[in-house]
Image (tube, rainbow, N blue to C red):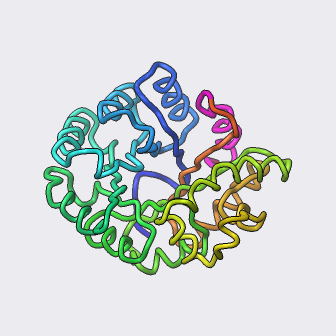
Amino acid sequence: MTSHQFGPFGITTGLDSSPESLAAALAAEELGYPAIWLSGGRLPGLQTIVDLVGATTSINFVSGILSVDQYRAEDVSTTYASVEASAPGRFTVGLGGAHGPRPLATLNTFLDALDGVPQERRLLAALGPRMLELARDRSAGAYPFLITPSYSAQARTVLGPDKLLAVSHLVVVETDAERARAIARNTIGFFPRLPGYAASLKRQGFTDAELEQLPDHLIDALAAWGTPADVKAKLSEHLDAGADHVAINVITGVTGPQPIEQWRALAGTLLE
């Protein structure tokens, strides 16, 4: 395994520069989480990264992920340099989101233009074997989402022993099985409609029928739920399979404030 500053468990969430988001980042830091992975789909702009780092003192931030279809390499490099100057080592650039017919070529071109961001401070949102190879060859490692522990083991084989493998995993802090699975199913159900995720899930052994029906065993494979101890046991399967870090993506089934209470409920078990 590679050594890194993220520890075994961190947080995946969407934040902006609002007072509520800055307070949530501070709360995560005070709880002891070592890293926040910023959901790229919700990130309103690169200034958010600067604002979050400036509002905290020690927690690490990773853009998980910045879509290369939405941001210019020059702007990402400038943001990285700004944060590195004021808070060295606290921002890692996570990239992905290359759509179109040649995603690997698109990412390679972007990486070629990413001046000033050293390879050890880049990560790629990699799912398929060729993207994992690119992450191995041109970044510090990979940050996959919606994968099973068995696939973590396969990803580790591709990456080799010295690259970071950080997994984003859905978490529902709920002990009622029916309710927990319903919350997870509502989130997971969107992803099989996306070609990249559908292909990834099929590589993991799920059938077309399972991707359409979302049976309980599929939900249980892709989301951790139950007590904090249950959640830790499930997430630890990724660590046992070769992952270095698991970023918990807490979902509650409602749109609203950051799930700070759930982070707090999990912290005593995950961070002990």
Picture quadrant where residue 90 is located: top left
Picture quadrant where residue 169 is located: bottom right
Residue sitting at x 13%, y 52%: 115
Q: Is residue 263 magenta?
A: yes
Horizontal side, residue 11 vs residue 125: left or right? right
Residue sitting at x 47%, y 42%: 36
Towards the viewer: 50 or 205: 205
Which region of the structure is painted magenta? 256-271
Q: Is residue 14 above or below residue 175?
A: above
Horizontal side, residue 149 vs residue 44: left or right? right
Horizontal side, residue 73 vs residue 205: left or right? left
Towards the viewer: 230 or 155: 155
Residue sitting at x 24%, y 60%: 119
Q: Position of residue 148 (x, y in %)?
A: 61, 69
Q: Is residue 15 magenta?
A: no
Q: Is residue 231 above or below residue 207?
A: above
Residue sitting at x 60%, y 27%: 257
**Label tally:** 0
Image quadrant holding the N terminus, namely bottom left
Q: Position of residue 178 (x, y in %)?
A: 84, 51
Q: Position of residue 258 (x, y in %)?
A: 59, 31
Towards the viewer: 168 or 119: 168
Q: Position of residue 35 (x, y in %)?
A: 46, 44
Q: Give the main secondary structure, helix, strand or loop, of the magenta stretch.
A: helix
